[in-house]
Amino acid sequence: MRFLVFDAGPLISLTLSGLLDILPKIHSGLKETKFVLTPQVKFEVIDKSKTNKKFSLEAFKIEKLIKDKVFSLSSEFVQNKNLSEETQKVLSFSSQLIKSYGHNVQLLQEGEASCIAFFKLAKKDCLIVSDERTVRLISESKYLLAERMKSKLHSEVFLNEKNFKYFEDLKYIRSSELVFYALKKDLIDIEKSPEALEALLYSLKFHGTAISQKEIEEAKELYKNGPRGS
């Protein structure tokens, strides 16, 4: 069994871009894959959002995906108590990765940490669906992360090399890659072309996905030159 555990960011980007309906289609084609929401992410995208008239419609749309069995709650696979404890461990470790002005820098929010905790507890083939660049850099490039934080904080930063080891095995996918896959598989009612992909990816970018112009150009080239069925 394979898991895709979703952070809030991709769900928000997909919803605001009018692309949430690709998830049931992708899910239907991946028979052995479970789409997972942790309690922390569910609270952010459904429970909390329902109290804000600006986002309540999106909350109901995402909630329907749970009712339709597109999303499974993480409690079906790991106990909430264990997930909560591991989430606190993730938050503790991540808060000690970088120091600035002699103080620890908090890099993760609870929803993001809960996805990492699920990854650690599931002990199966798992991907974290996250659009937040900082989250991914923790495991993909600690030195680039340090440069970004140095620029953001306008200060020298210091790495705790030991704590980064906990995050080394994490694997990620972004909403942009889900959209790329969906367009390739004819799951989006739009012309199949590099230009259409560009429009889709820019919509995600403008709704919160951390994807650069260079990455969009690279995705267009991959779409144009890669195998059509891939």
Image: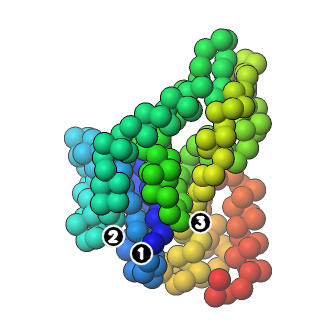
- As helix, strand or loop, the secondary structure at mark 2 comes to loop
Q: Position of residue 96 (x, y in %)?
A: 60, 25
Question: Of callouts 3 and 2, which one flags the residue occurring earlier in the amino acid sequence?
Answer: 2
C-alpha separation, residue under disc 3 versus residue under disc 2: 18 Å
Q: Is the residue under label 1 in contact with that under label 2 (CB below 8 Å)?
A: yes
The residue wearing badge 2 is: 70
Quick one: label 2, few (<14), some, or many (20+) residues within 10 Å?
some
| Location of residue 3 with respect to 157 vertically, above or below | below
Residue 13 appears in view = no
Residue at x-position 61% and y-position 41%: 166
- Label 2 sits on what residue type? Val
Q: Nearer the viewer, mark 3 or mark 1?
A: 1
Q: Quadrant of the N terminus?
A: bottom left
The residue wearing badge 3 is: 177
Question: Of callouts 3 and 1, which one flags the residue occurring earlier in the amino acid sequence?
Answer: 1
- As helix, strand or loop, the secondary structure at mark 3 comes to helix
Q: Quadrant of residue 147?
A: top right
Question: Of callouts 2 and 1, which one flags the residue occurring earlier in the amino acid sequence?
Answer: 1
The residue wearing badge 1 is: 27
